Image (cartoon, rainbow, N blue to C red):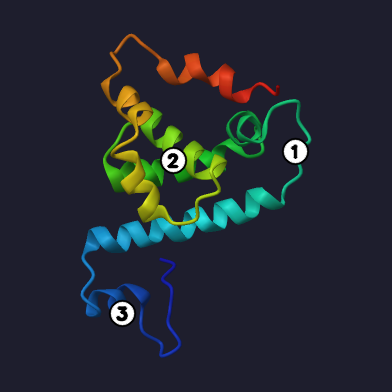
Amino acid sequence: MNKRISRKGKSEKWITRRKGLSGKEIASLKVSREYLKYRNKMNRLPNDTVLTRWGMYCHDKRYKDYTASIVKMIMDDMGINSDQAYYMLYYMVSNNITDYERAKADMYVDENFEIYKRKGKGEKLWMKNCFRIFRKK
């Protein structure tokens, strides 16, 4: 069990609960922190593939597991499907957004996010749109 410890030796979870944050807010802060780590790490990497940067993040075997782990955190935090979570991560990365809460608010009014929400079982909208996003122009 890897717990973060504050300077005073108390666990971070205890401190945030004492400040009046709920479990959902703590989870959201964790996703925000992990996304910033992901963004900083991925921005330092050179794009040595024939794909765009986003294509490298999603399809290169070196990075796609890390990207999928961030997507899973977003899915769990917001209660959305994987297509919506990938779109949200794409939106944050491509628009250079660092504030996770702002991105969440933007998603609730974004029509593309709603398209991924309403997709039918047989349709794979994310895969249809993949090639438009991943190809270099």
Quadrant containing the N terminus in the rendered view: bottom left
Alpha carbon distance from label 3 to label 2? 27 Å
The first of marks 1 and 2 along the sequence is: 1
Identify which amino acid the numbered label 1 is placed on.
Asn
Q: CA distance from mark 1 to mark 3?
A: 40 Å
Dot 2 amino acid type:
Val
Callout 3 secondary element:
helix
The residue that appears at 41% across and 16% down in the rendered structure is: 125
In this rendering, the label closer to the viewer, 1 or 2: 1
Disc sitting over residue 47 in the figure? 1
Image quadrant of residue 119? top left
> Mark 1 or mark 3: which comes first in sequence?
3
- Residue appearing at x 64%, y 48% in the figure: 42
**Where 26 falls versus 45 (above or below)?**
below
Please give the residue where the numbered disc 3 appears in the rendered image.
Answer: 15
Q: Quadrant of residue 28?
A: bottom left
